[in-house]
Image: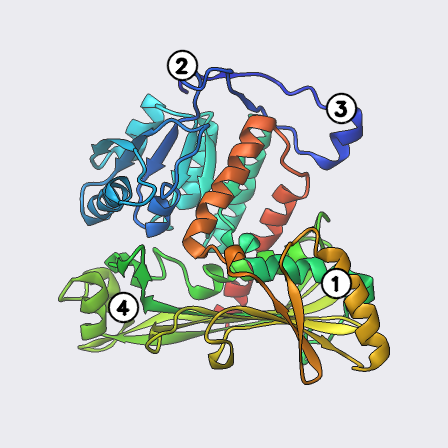
Amino acid sequence: MSKKIRYGFLVICIAFLSCKTDTKPIVLNDDPKESKITFITVDPGHFHAALVQKSTYKEVDTTVHIYAPEGDDADLHLKRIKAYNNRIENPTNWNSIVYTGDDFFEKMISEKKGDVVVLAGNNQKKTEYIKESLEAGLNVLADKPMAINSEDFQLLKQAFDTAAQNNLILYDIMTERFEITSILQKELAMNKDIFGVLEKGSADNPAVIKESIHHFHKNVSGSILTRPPWFFDVEQEGEGIVDVTTHLVDLVQWQCFPEQIISYETDVALNAATREPTFITMKEFKDVTKLDYFPPYLKQYMTNDSTIAVFCNGEINYKIKGVHAKVAVNWNYKAPEGTGDTHFSIIKGSKANLTIKQGEEQNYKPTLYIEPVHANDEYAIVLEAAFNKLKPKYPGIELKQTNNSWEVVIPDSYSVGHEAHFAQVTEKFIEYLTKGNMPEWEVPNMITKYYITTKALEIAKKK
């Protein structure tokens, strides 16, 4: 733990005890030079580790200690940080102190050069790293997924127990909560005049559907992303059904049941789950990894000498607090020119459905629609009055009627982009650290989220 930081218990008013999780906040001194949170980055094999540092934070020391095995993952991470430091617009000033070696994790635990472990990389041992970091007295900010199978889920529950016992914070990076169409979809779903009440749906006709399409070949921070070869090994990265779906499951909970504790033991029932592979050729693999052969650990997925099957696609049908939901993820190799990853979402209400589309008609930009169950003049009047009350909170938003629905017109200034959301999540995490005000629903709902994804994988594999 950094000597510059002293810990103290936050005195919380009784009125707030019901809505906060007790943690030991990091108390910062008035002089920012004398008191800073210090990040420790461990095994940064995923580019999300670098995106946490695409911005700087006034509460965080610019010196970051990095512990990693020697190799391309660490090298690529350092190149990304250097690029942020050297860019013309809003350059950062991170100072990286690096240790590489096979004993990188043990070295990190023994030295404890900071207060927060940042984990975004190979997921095979991530849950172990989370638990052991917490046992060493370190807070953890982890990229998704924090668990990729049922064994990891059991370990993750123990990790949350450890965090509670040590008054520490374990938090995962849910960037989609900061996407403006998702924010407004949630806002409108809470408005009974516009939305009504959430439908229950059925297994065949879910009331909530969230689907996303991703691509192995993609542009990040202005250049084509180089992916580590292990990204294609589901034993190291995790299958799609336990990876990207964490965002979708999180949104279902966050939007439809805001600030409610959701128990995986009493509030969730899984109906069905499926998994399918995407086939990647040797040429495609080389283009995104810069490696001209399949490593030995990928041999088990080979369908012939030049193709591997990657189980990165999946679908989960489940019931949550009596509401039927479906989440699905699909990975293609490369998006059509001018497009990128896409998202579809619908939440069905008694008065209207709230739908996010991101197709050709929307120029591949997330667009939110209000689709009334009964489109008539009376609903239009009520909608306009209720929507006008939202405008002071979100200046610039407007309604545009399109046939029998309304598009929510959102100023471009709200669309900061996926990469910027990492700073927003990190700032929220820092707030929880320094104020000790993490809501009581966050931890049980994280546990429920990973129960859903890992249990779904177990069900899908049985098929």
* Badge 2 amino acid: Lys
Q: Residue 4: image x %, image y %?
A: 42, 15
Which dot marks residue 3? 2
**Residue closest to the eye, 426 or 454:** 426
Lower sequence index among marks 1 and 3: 3
Lower sequence index among marks 4 and 3: 3
Lower sequence index among marks 2 and 3: 2
- Residue sitting at x 34%, y 36%: 41
Residue 164 seen anywhere in this rendered image of the structure: yes
Query: Marks 4 and 3, how far apart in space?
Result: 57 Å
Query: Marks 2 and 1, how far apart in space?
Result: 51 Å
Lower sequence index among marks 2 and 4: 2
Q: Residue 18: image x %, image y %?
A: 76, 34
Residue 452 seen anywhere in this rendered image of the structure: no
Q: Is residue 100 left or right of residue 264?
A: left
Query: Marks 2 and 3, how far apart in space?
Result: 29 Å
Q: Residue 446: image x %, image y %?
A: 59, 48
Query: Marks 1 and 3, how far apart in space?
Result: 35 Å
* Badge 1 amino acid: Phe
- Residue sitting at x 82%, y 65%: 193
Q: Secondary structure at mark 3?
A: loop
* Badge 4 amino acid: Gln
